[in-house]
Every structure is written in C-alpha cells, then in structure tokens.
Image (cartoon, helix red, strand yellow):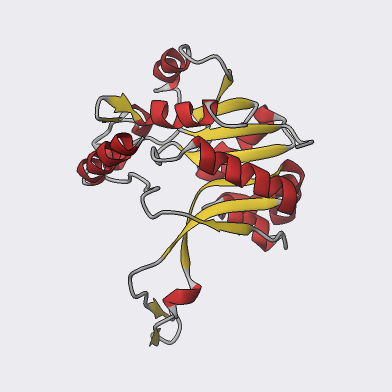
Amino acid sequence: MNYNCAGIIVAAGSGTRMGGVSKPNIKILGVTLFEYVLKAFCQSMAERIVVVCSKDNIESLKEIAAGYNKEISFVLGGSTRAESVFNGITAANADIACVHDCARPFITAYLIDQTIKTAAEKGASCLCSPITDTVKHKDPQTGIVSTPNRDNMFAVQTPQCFKTEHYLNAKAAAGESYISFTDETSLLEAAGVEVEYIKTSCTNIKLTTVDDIPIAEILMKRALNND
C-alpha cells in the first residue's frame, strides 16, 4: 500500500450516561475500553495512532499507552464529535485516517486492516451490521408512519476510514455546519464521496449506558475464549 495511515481513537467523551466515569476508563473484565481498542490498533497496519482525549482522562490514557511500542500521540477533543475527529485528523497528518470510537472495545486488528485496505482502494470505507428489528419512520410534517424494507438497511459502526483529502474537501464544502454531522460517512456522502460499507458482526457494539456493561462482559468472555 502506497499510503501511510493513522488510527484515530476518539476517547474524549464525558461518560455522563456511564455514571460520570470517562468511557475509555470503564473496565470490562478488569481491562479498560481504551486498552482493548489500543491493543487492536497496535496490532493493525496503522503506522501511528492519535488518541483524541479530554483534560480529565489524558493522564490516565497516557499511562496505559506507555506500555505499547507503536507511535502514539494525544490531542484534546472539541465540544462535539465532529470537532474532536477534526482535531485528531489534523494531528495525524496522514494520507488515510481510520477513525474509531473508544466505546467499541470489540474491534480487531483484522477488521481495522480491512477498512484501511478498502479505503486505500475505494477512497472511503466503514464497518456496518444488518438491522434485525423492524424499523418505523414517522414523517415529521405529515405524521404518516412507514415501514422501510430492513433488507436494504444497515447500522453504521466504526472504524470509518477514508483518504484524508476526501475528508478535508467534505469539511470545507460543509462549512461551519460540519459540526452537525454525527459521523464521518454522513459528511463524506453529503459531499458526493462514495463509501464502501463492509458488513460485519453485530457484536462490534458501542457501550452507551451502564446497562451495556454486563452485556459487554458476556460478549468479551466469549470473544476471549475463542481466541
């Protein structure tokens, strides 16, 4: 591959819905979410890693990262996810950026490498999983409820990986409104960039509330037993 790639770990969340504990510092089976994710990126083809963190967790995350030998740097996040990702991508200064939420501890080096290789070939890529629930859509203007065909729908995950030039062009096209985009695929697609979606398991879950922790512990035990 003729591109250099950086992994961007987004770890700046406040953890308000996690009882006030910073998400990266939450432990599953005695290991922090941050270390699960960091280990996967250190085993991947990403040449370096940028951790987007907060003033509250930067020292604890640096302490964990000291045990790894890949190039790892830290940058403070912004007031929104979009600003945090931009800070990370700017600090990375790489041809390809592979952005991952620290709240998804089940990511593997294999899946990271799949998104990097696909982005290098196609320009942008993202993990996704099939939707198994029936989904309803209510039109905010008419109040009419419709049922989209779930066979044509999927849930977007991370990593979201793309050539940095595509991201910067999309951000410039969006102007100040870029901060309203909740993920990078939406920003890229708004600028006309086609994203290649890679289907994977539903177990690449994102931990959002304290209720997710017991579920994550069960899944992590299963994952570790299968290694």
Locate residue 205 relative to residue 120 in the image: left or right.
left
Q: Is the C terminus in the top left, top right, bottom left or bottom right quadrant?
A: top left
The quarter holding residue 218 reads top left
Please tell me whether residue 58 is drawn above or below residue 201 in the rendered image: above
Residue that extends furthest to the front in the rendered view of this protein: 226
Locate residue 31 relative to residue 108 in the image: left or right.
left
Locate residue 172 relative to residue 157 in the image: left or right.
right
Residue that extends furthest to the right in the rendered view of this protein: 2
Q: Is the N terminus in the top left, top right, bottom left or bottom right quadrant?
A: top right
The tally of labels here is 0
Locate residue 124 relative to residue 55 in the image: left or right.
right
Please tell me whether residue 198 is drawn above or below residue 26 in the rendered image: below
| Res. 76 visible in picture | no
The residue positioned 27% from the left and 41% from the top of the image is 222
The quarter holding residue 20 reads top left
Please tell me whether residue 154 is drawn above or below residue 6 in the rendered image: below
Q: Position of residue 35 (x, y in %)?
A: 40, 25
Which of the two residues, 14 or 25, is positioned nearer the viewer here?
25
The residue positioned 73% from the left and 50% from the top of the image is 121
Q: Position of residue 139 (x, y in %)?
A: 44, 81
The residue positioned 41% from the left and 54% from the top of the image is 201
Q: Position of residue 98 (x, y in %)?
A: 60, 40
Q: Position of residue 73 (x, y in %)?
A: 58, 20
| Res. 39 visible in picture | yes
The residue positioned 55% from the left and 40% from the top of the image is 112
